[in-house]
Amino acid sequence: MTFRYPSEACHSFFKSKRIFDFTSAILPSIVKPMNFRHIAFGLCFLAATSVCNAAEDYPAEKEQSLFGRYASNAQELVVRALTFVGVNYRRGGESPETGFDCSGLVRHVFRESLGLILPRTSRDISRVGETVQRDELQPGDLVFFNTLRRGFSHVGIYLGEHRFVHAPASGGEVRVEDMRQSYWTKRFNGARRIAAAEPESAAN
């Protein structure tokens, strides 16, 4: 699925604010300790600009509503997900009070941000939404990995600039990782886009 600029005003805004320069500067340092308000602020702009920079032919009558929904949803997802960085991993956990496992984090973020109720396991979540190629990833997409010698056994939320946030494993905590690391590159299973969905479509 592709999107074009909903208006010249949108394009001019992001261009005049030098958002592309801003996000290029903020994301390489996201794995370092820093104020999460700054991270969230940067990712808000990333989600919007990544969508604004996507291209080409989509029906004009649907363009603005889809663009608006996707951009808004992606921003909400990445900002909320980043607020949980540092929360302890807990198998079966689905709340910041008790801790998260990988699918529990994703389910919590999507439920609280968008009102979408996703399946409980990462494998079942991988069947929701639409397939996205790795070179077409946008903030808010879900990325899947084989970490338990079975496909789609791990899931995280893509942030942009090759990075994703996830709840890793027992003894760990929610953190941001770079997908270009060999461990993740070898285990990447695919990606899905759910952020543009209506609540009822994800629940079905």
Image (tube, rainbow, N blue to C red):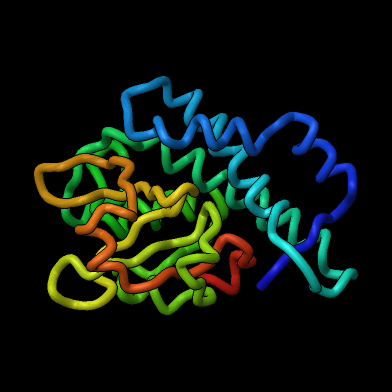
Above or below, 97 against 91 in this view is: above
Q: Is residue 81 above or below residue 70?
A: above
Q: Residue furthest left?
A: 171
Q: Is residue 36 above or below residue 84?
A: above
| Quadrant where the N terminus is found in the figure | bottom right
When asked about the image quadrant of residue 56, the answer is: bottom right
Left or right: 105, with 140 as reference point = left
Residue drawn at (41%, 54%), measured in percent from left and top? 157
Residue 63, how many percent across, how many down?
A: 82, 65
Q: Residue at x 32, y 54 (%)?
A: 180
Which of the 4 image quadrants contains residue 12?
A: top right
In front of the other: 56 or 113 = 56
Q: Position of residue 181 (x, y in %)?
A: 26, 53
User: Looking at this view, is 55 or 195 the one in front?
Assistant: 55
Q: Is residue 49 left or right of residue 137?
A: right
Q: Position of residue 122 (x, y in %)?
A: 31, 68
At a point 22% along the width and 58% down the height, the residue shown is 182
Taking the image as shown, residue 9 lies to the left or right of residue 50, namely: right
Comparing 126 with 1, the one in front is 1
Q: Position of residue 86 (x, y in %)?
A: 27, 33
Q: Residue furthest top?
A: 35
Judge left or right: residue 86 versus residue 128: left
